[in-house]
Amino acid sequence: MKKQFKLGVIGCGQNAVSVLRGVVLSDFIKEKKIIVSDKDENALDSINYLGVRTTLDYAFVAQNSEFLLIAVNSKDFVEVCKELSDIRPEKIISVMDGLTKSEIKNAFGLGVIKVARCTMDLPCSIGSGVIAIDMSDFNKSTDDTDFISNVFGNLGTVVSVEENKLNSISAVCGNSVYGLMLADSLISAGEKQGLTKHEAKIVAAQSLLGTAELIQREDCTVDELVMQACKNGNFAIGAIKSLQDNCFNRIVSEAVEACILRLVGSK
């Protein structure tokens, strides 16, 4: 039986709002075909400008939506399942960190449930993020896989991967904290060297943005780009030596490992 809504969303946090903005403002899904539920009325009021239908009733959303996007914190998933105890959604998209597809299916009692599991990072809020998705459950339907890809297509770069790589991708992205903390350190260092905060922010942000574009566009390795940077301005060798002496690579590697441990233990 055809559902009233194409996309139902449970949870109205940052990730959900990013998705909603992407699909509505791009006109990929008409507002009247989307329904959103959250227990926080203020959160629902904050998306009134998008024109989507809202409700406090999780069960109504699950019963009447073809695709159910679950965007609550992992620790709140148990409460969601309690409200949906008599409902078996057929097509689920999860943006919950740490919860596997099997765990989600088991929570709903298996059946014919298909689950696409997705990770997102902070820049998705401005359409410049990284979205990694395992949608292998939907591989027999190109209509379904195309729909899921397009839901996230306006939020940044979509990467289709196996589920066992999702935590690694989340950890490498780190929800962008690596770049943000590096930018903050560069801004502080710039101020220490006589720049205003505004000047340092512009320089640091543009340098990181340009570096990201350079990595994507060039065919050579990052190591080769580092060598090229040193040739173009050998003063950079001083920075490299200081970073190496302070075990920069080890610090980053340990941060990624800590992120994975946090993901695994987040349930």
Image (cartoon, rainbow, N blue to C red):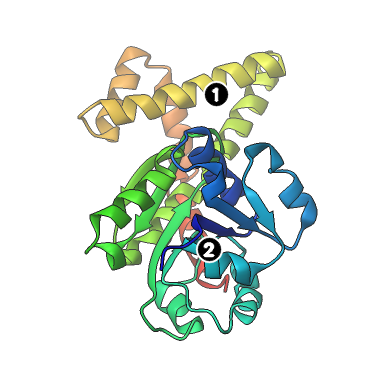
* Residue type marked 1: Ala
The image shows residue 112, relative to residue 13, as above or below, that is below
* Residue type marked 2: Met
265 with respect to 162 (left or right): right
Instruction: Residue 13: tell me if it is visible.
Output: no
Identify the residue at image location x=46%, y=61%: 257
Q: Nearer the viewer, residue 181 or 54?
A: 54
Identify the residue at image location x=63%, y=18%: 200
The label number, if any, that marks residue 96 in the structure image = 2
Res 191 quadrant in image = top right
Image quadrant containing the N terminus: bottom left
133 with respect to 34 (left or right): left
* Residue 261 rendering spot, x and y as whole percentages: 51, 68
Res 144 quadrant in image = bottom left
- Tag 1's secondary structure? helix
Tag in front: 1 or 2: 2
* Residue 212 rendering spot, x and y as whole percentages: 40, 29
Q: Nearer the viewer, residue 94 or 212?
A: 94
The label number, if any, that marks residue 205 in the structure image = 1
238 with respect to 46 (left or right): left
* Residue 183 rendering spot, x and y as whole percentages: 58, 31
The label number, if any, that marks residue 223 in the structure image = none
Q: Residues within 10 Å of mark 2 (few under 14, many from 20)?
A: many
Res 162 quadrant in image = bottom left
Image quadrant containing the C terminus: bottom right
Distance, label 1 to label 2, CA atoms, is: 29 Å
* Residue 3 rendering spot, x and y as whole percentages: 47, 62
The image shows residue 256, relative to residue 183, as above or below, that is below
129 with respect to 158 (left or right): right
